[in-house]
Amino acid sequence: MRNRPVFLNLLKIRLPLAGLISILHRISGIVFFFGFPLLLYMYGLLPLSNELNELLAVSAVKFVLWGMVSAFVYHFLAGVRHMVADFGHNHELSRANHSGILVLILSVLMSLWAGVLLW
């Protein structure tokens, strides 16, 4: 009988940058999918500006909205990166790592900018 591991410790696994980008892309898509009804509700409140202003006065709503915008920005940038790779432009490891770093940096900068505009 072979010695098989009892459990898989996911914290000990070191993913390459492309794997991390891919997993974060999926997580941001799930976050955006479940938060989309809030965006639709807020979009419905646009003609009623007083109610929307009262809703945006709550810090928790601003934080959730900022998280939604950040998830969308990351999902969009990582999706563009995946599409460019699918067309055959990122087959070298160095170019794939550079584009992954670029996606992370741009998404952090754009998320910070969205936070500044929101608050």
Image (tube, helix red, strand yellow):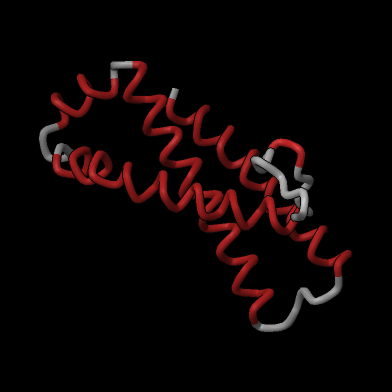
Residue at left offset 39%, top offset 47%: 32
Q: Position of residue 118 (x, y in %)?
A: 43, 28
Q: Nearer the viewer, residue 62 or 35?
A: 35
Please state, as top left, top right, bottom left or bottom right, where the C terminus lies in the image. top left
The residue at the far front in this view is 1
In the rendered image of this protein, does residue 11 appear above or below residue 18? above
The picture places residue 19, in percent across and down from the top left corner, at 70, 56
Q: Between residues 21 and 114, which one lies in front from this camera angle?
A: 21
Q: Residue furthest bottom?
A: 87
Describe residue 42's horizontal placement relative to residue 65 as left or right: left
Q: Find the residue positioned furthest to the top.
A: 58
Task: Please state if 60 lies on the left or on the right of 114 as rendered.
Answer: left
Q: Residue at x 52, y 49 (%)?
A: 73
Front position in the image: 87 or 18: 18
Residue at 14% x, 24% y: name it: 50
Q: Is 42 placed above or below 21 here?
A: above
Instruction: Return the residue nearer the eye: 85 or 55.
Output: 85
Is 19 placed left or right of 49 in the picture? right
In this view, the residue farthest toward the right is 94
In the rendering, at what x and y percent does residue 88 appear? 72, 83
> What is the number of callouts on the image?
0
Q: Residue at x 56, y 49 (%)?
A: 74
Instruction: Report the side of 51 relative to 69 (left or right).
Output: left
Quadrant of the drawing holding the N terminus: bottom right
Instruction: Give the quarter of the image for residue 79.
Output: bottom right
